[in-house]
Image: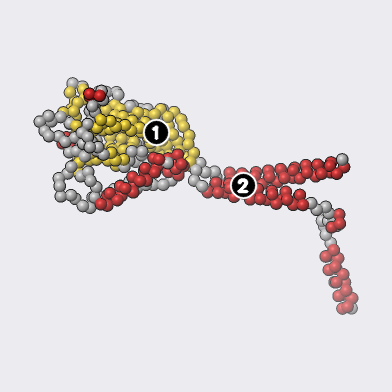
Amino acid sequence: MLRRRKEVITEAIKATKNLDAFPKLEDDYQETSSARGTITIFVLGVILILVALNIREYFSEKVKYSYEVDFDYNSKLKLNVDITVAMSCNDIGADVMDKSSKDIISNHGINMEDTWFELSPNQQKNYEYISQLYETIRNDYHALHSTLWYYKIQNSLGPREVYPNQSPDACRVHGTFELNKIAGNFHIIVGKSISFMGNHAHMVNIFGNTKVNFSHRIDNFSFGDDSDLVHNALNYDLKITKSEKTSFQYFVTVVSTEINSIKTYQYSVTEKHREIDHSKESHGSSGILFKYDISPLKVKVDNGNMSFLELSILLIGIIGGIFATSKMMNSLYQSLKEFLLNF
């Protein structure tokens, strides 16, 4: 009885092994092709390359720029300055004027304090480091602009740890004040500013022995609220002159900028300096002049990276499209092969 039961179980196992719900062709009836294998390997290689490139693009930082007209022309514009001039504060004046009035619009926000033009050792070390970074940005901006919005640069020279034994030989002009959003200028020239009968002038002490030297260092020249994501073109710029008759001019175009919903301003600048020589028709006065104008355009800077859902849809489309194309190519190859064999 046990022997009979064992035979039944063995036959059931054999029947189960032979059971196959999916009919298969015998090996003798299957047609193999090296071309199909080549196409399959090629397709898989293309898919892997495209998937890898798109995943890499997904994780890379991207910036998207958009432009529109700036209709916010009634609001005020902040100007932030921090400039050290190689002259005594008693001998120079700093003012802001715009085209709406010949008079001074604001000098209450300007602070002037005596200091030394030469930096302390630690300050000089920090200055060289920061100025080198800004110089790199100015020279290679077109290659770096996509990453600048994600990195912060040190913007402080730090406190002076060593004080010279000599009297201060420079003046630090710094402050923040509000401007109208129209063209104007900020200037530092010899003499204190006065307003006389609606006109603007600078009073010079003709009896004094004023040593004129407009060598200067710009630690900060920016518009709007301070933002670590905006790298201002003039920051940590140094100009040295030996002449008493040098005029430094900066022509600035201010552009309203919105960075991930943060409203601020950036600017472009063109620099020019010349020697005042009336005999050669080079007229004017020595000093530092910033002429600014407001651009009617507004720049929006946003994160340009795609979402994970967009990446998934893109990869599915790539894989499906390549498989469909490879199948069509394979069918075309087989049809062409049969045509040539039957020709």
Image quadrant where one finds the C terminus: top right
Label 1: which secondary element: strand
Q: Residue furthest bottom?
A: 2
Q: Is residue 303 above or below residue 48?
A: above
Quarter of the view holding residue 240? top left
Residue 180: image location, x then y, percent: 31, 28
Q: Residue at x 36, y 38 (%)?
A: 233
In-image side of 109 versus 68 (left or right): left
Q: Which mark is residue 256?
A: 1
For badge 2, the amino acid type reads Leu
Determine contact: label 2, label 1, CB under 8 Å: no
Q: Residue at x 39, y 40 (%)?
A: 138
Q: Which residue is mark 2?
A: 50
Q: Residues within 10 Å of mark 2 (few under 14, many from 20)?
A: some
Q: Residue at x 69, y 49 (%)?
A: 42
Residue 26: image location, x then y, percent: 85, 57
Q: Residue furthest left?
A: 207
For badge 1, the amino acid type reads Ser
